[in-house]
Image (cartoon, rainbow, N blue to C red):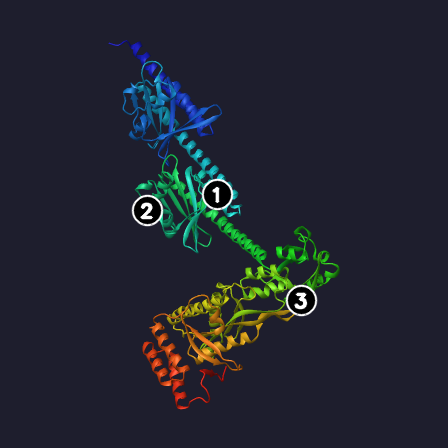
């Protein structure tokens, strides 16, 4: 039978242990309740539990529900280092999910033990005590892990004590964890606001894109990020920056790939495994050697609700992108979309300013702008050259102090503009410069904003000095390069001279009828298009356009610059004009428009050339009988049913080989001497002139009989020509002429000369 005194002693000892146990738990509660931060709570709880359990080391791990990780804070000097591991790994992860404490007598024999940490630190783990941290409601919020019992091994009493201690501290831990998370969130929001404020203050689009990508990459702890903007003109997504890769321009259709799908749908895509997604295109990875693991892509929407691009972030470090990452990136892009719109607008303004500056510099006229107070704001290069000044000598100065003495009238005209809404022109004004004076036309206008409010004034200077006038005149007629070359060689080349040139005249057939059908606007459009095509043909061969006479064109070859083969150039131009016209008529027919037909006359002869006109209006032109004959030949095309007629002068000077047939020996109106004329046929195709050579041969034989006065034989040859080409109007004309001559023979000796009575 037990000793009564011994039993009483045991009971008292048990009560004493319970009292000490309760006192220890109350001490834990009082100790950690007074602490403000999670770091202090963890440090204190680790110290208390390690001491009470008599272990060498201890760690408290709390669960991060957002990342699925267990984390703890370790003090290293003045810095708190955070340790994180997946809440499914190791002994701690096993206990967390099992919700049951574990005593590991031999750590290295347990399958859940991860010995990598021992190998890294040099610490040797012998045994482990690990218990879940539960709240009073039974929710597991972490684990407590003790390593290496100082004496002996961990017991069930140790496990029970550890569970009691962690349960006692669970509420404080949970509250501290919530407070810590709230502080983190608050700090993140402050950091986010600072970040957004810092980014949206940038107006340079390129710099803004770089900063956005840098901050997005840092904010989400990612490897790379790219902001793609939509180009509405090309329907492409483009970017010129990329974090983690070299600065480059990327463009692709705005419906392709992950970015394209997000842009077209307007929906965020969070892809944890890129290569498992059918929308992912791995070609870029293959080109760069980069390996894409995870993708977060969100649309960028402006304040009007319009999609303007997408932001794509790659490879979250430590795992896939979370819902919080999505929210933060969406909020970030919503804020920076305003900055993007402003930067794009600023970029457009800069481009427009650069365009305007380039336009001013490329102008041949001088341009000076003034603000409303009369200060000179800009002066383009031509104006500087005209006024013989440097930019620093004029820009920034007051007009009143710059335009003085003999030029003071310019300041007066600028002041006068204040009282006038309409621009006005000062013609033939003399402007005094350092090297003397110049004559110019000055135009004064107001500069207005989009609301028609005055911003300042502008003065345009058109130099009308003799050299300027000659260059301008010549450039209307020939390639400007040739004109400048001529003027550089001779200052008086336009003074007037007699020379040999080949003159080309062309005219539209039935133009009056065409104008009646098309009306005024249609006629102008037709002529503009027609003249453009024909003038290009003339300039390709170095010809000079002299003038337009209604629907007619007058051009010359051999003036003012000779080439040695000007007659051939003129013939080639006539042939090419007909070919271009044929192709243009095909296009007009396809549009339901009537065809345009022309006649061309060429003559080579002496002409008088020169710059003719008044001091304010001059034209470089040609006059003389040689010019008149070319005009007569163009008109004769109608009579001879031909398209290109050339004189004997031109024919005998040709060095090339062409398809040409003699047409007639004729005295044109206003002349007394007969002229041999020829028809050029090289522009014809087999469709427009079938059996051309056979037709020409029969016609030439008929013409020989005609000139010999053998009317019947001539008719027979012309009829054979018509059998080869029934539409040969020239053969038909000669048949009718021969029949008239047979009925009414010519008086006197027949010499084959035909006299035209009309132009």
Left or right of 202? Residue 279 is: left
* Residue 16 picture quarter: top left
| Whole-percent x, y for residue 51 in the image | 40, 18
- The residue at 40%/23% (across/down) is 46
Tell which circle, 2 or 3, labels the residue nearer the N-terminal end.
2
Q: Is residue 88 visible?
A: yes
* Residue carrying label 3: 426
Whether 159 is drawn above or below 644: the answer is above
Secondary structure at numbered mark 3: strand
Q: Are marks 1 and 2 in contact (CB under 8 Å)?
A: no
Mark 1 surroundings within 10 Å by alpha-carbon count, few (fewer than 14), some (14 through 19), many (20 or more)? some
Q: Is residue 420 visible?
A: no
Q: Are marks 3 and 1 in contact (CB under 8 Å)?
A: no
Distance CA(mark 1)–CA(mark 2): 27 Å
Secondary structure at numbered mark 2: loop
Dividing the image into 4 quarters, which one contains the N terminus? top left
Of 306 and 673, the residue lying toward us: 673
* Residue carrying label 2: 279
Left or right of 448? Residue 431 is: right
| Mark 3 or mark 1, whichever is nearer to me | 3
| Whole-percent x, y for residue 102 in the image | 30, 23
Mark 2 surroundings within 10 Å by alpha-carbon count, few (fewer than 14), some (14 through 19), many (20 or more)? some
| Mark 2 or mark 3, whichever is nearer to me | 3
* Residue carrying label 1: 210
Distance CA(mark 3)–CA(mark 1): 52 Å
């Amino acid at each position: 039978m037990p000793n009564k005194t011994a039993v009483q002693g045991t009971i008292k000892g048990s009560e004493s242990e319970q009292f000490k146990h309760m006192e220890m738990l109350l001490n834990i509660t009082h100790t950690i309740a007074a602490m403000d931060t999670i770091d202090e709570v963890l440090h204190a709880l680790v110290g208390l539990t390690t001491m009470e359990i008599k272990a060498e080391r201890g760690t408290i791990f709390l669960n991060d529900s957002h990342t699925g990780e267990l984390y703890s804070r370790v003090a290293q000097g003045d810095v708190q280092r955070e340790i994180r591991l997946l809440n499914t790994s190791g002994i701690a992860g096993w206990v967390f999910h099992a919700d049951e404490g574990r005593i590991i007598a031999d750590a290295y024999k347990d399958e859940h033990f991860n010995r990598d940490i021992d190998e890294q630190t040099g610490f040797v783990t012998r045994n482990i005590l690990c218990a879940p941290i539960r709240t009073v409601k039974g929710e597991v919020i972490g684990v407590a892990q003790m390593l290496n019992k100082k004496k002996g091994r961990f017991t069930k009493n140790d496990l029970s004590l550890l569970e009691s201690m962690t349960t006692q501290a669970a509420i404080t831990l949970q509250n501290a964890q919530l407070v810590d998370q709230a502080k983190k969130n608050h700090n993140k929001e402050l950091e986010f606001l600072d970040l957004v404020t810092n980014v949206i203050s940038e107006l340079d689009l390129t710099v803004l894109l770089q900063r956005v990508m840098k901050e997005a990459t840092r904010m989400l702890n990612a490897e790379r990020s790219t902001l793609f903007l939509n180009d509405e003109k090309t329907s492409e997504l483009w970017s010129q920056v990329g974090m983690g890769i070299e600065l480059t321009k990327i463009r692709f259709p705005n419906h392709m790939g992950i970015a394209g799908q997000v842009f077209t749908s307007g929906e965020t895509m969070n892809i944890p495994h890129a290569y498992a997604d059918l929308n992912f295109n791995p070609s870029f990875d293959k080109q760069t050697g980069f390996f894409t693991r995870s993708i977060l892509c969100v649309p960028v929407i402006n304040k009007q609700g319009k999609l303007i691009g997408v932001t794509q972030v790659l490879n979250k470090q430590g795992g896939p992108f979370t819902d919080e990452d999505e929210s933060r990136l969406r909020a970030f892009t919503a804020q920076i979309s305003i900055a993007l719109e402003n930067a794009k607008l600023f970029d457009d303004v800069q481009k427009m300013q650069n365009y305007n500056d380039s336009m001013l510099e490329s102008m041949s006229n001088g341009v000076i702008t003034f603000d409303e107070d009369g200060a000179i704001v800009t002066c383009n290069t031509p104006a500087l050259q005209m006024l013989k000044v440097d930019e620093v000598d004029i820009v920034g100065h007051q007009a009143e102090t710059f335009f003085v003495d003999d030029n003071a009238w310019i300041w007066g005209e600028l002041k006068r503009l204040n009282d006038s809404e309409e621009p006005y022109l000062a013609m033939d004004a003399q402007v005094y410069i350092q090297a003397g004076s110049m004559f110019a036309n000055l135009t004064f206008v107001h500069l207005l904003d989009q609301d028609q409010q005055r911003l300042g004034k502008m003065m345009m200077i058109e130099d009308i000095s003799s050299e300027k006038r000659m260059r301008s005149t010549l450039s209307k007629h020939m390639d400007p390069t040739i004109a400048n070359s001529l003027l550089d060689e001779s200052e008086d080349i336009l003074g007037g001279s007699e020379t040999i040139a080949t003159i080309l005249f062309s005219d539209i057939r039935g133009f009056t009828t065409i104008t009646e059908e098309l009306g005024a606007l249609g006629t102008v459009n037709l002529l503009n298009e027609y003249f453009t095509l024909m003038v290009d043909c003339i300039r390709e061969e170095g010809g000079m356009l002299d003038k337009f006479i209604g629907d007619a064109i007058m051009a010359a070859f051999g003036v003012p610059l000779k080439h040695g083969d000007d007659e051939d150039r003129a013939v080639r131009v006539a042939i090419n004009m007909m070919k271009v016209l044929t192709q243009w008529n095909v296009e007009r027919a396809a549009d339901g428009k009537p065809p345009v037909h022309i006649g061309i006359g060429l003559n080579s002869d002496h002409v008088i050339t020169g710059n003719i006109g008044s001091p304010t209006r001059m034209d470089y032109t040609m006059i003389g009988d040689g010019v008149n004959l070319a005009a007569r030949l163009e008109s004769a095309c109608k009579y001879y049913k031909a398209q290109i007629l050339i004189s004997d002068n031109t024919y005998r000077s040709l060095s090339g080989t062409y398809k040409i047939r003699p047409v007639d020996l004729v005295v044109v109106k206003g002349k007394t001497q007969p002229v041999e004329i020829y028809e050029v046929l090289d522009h014809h195709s087999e469709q427009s002139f079938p059996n051309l050579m056979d037709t020409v041969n029969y016609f030439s034989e008929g013409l020989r009989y005609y000139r010999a006065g053998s009317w019947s034989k001539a008719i027979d040859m012309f009829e054979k020509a018509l059998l080869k080409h029934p539409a040969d109007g020239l053969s038909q004309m000669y048949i009718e002429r021969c029949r008239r001559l047979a009925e009414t023979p010519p008086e006197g000796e027949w010499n084959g000369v035909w006299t035209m009575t009309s132009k």
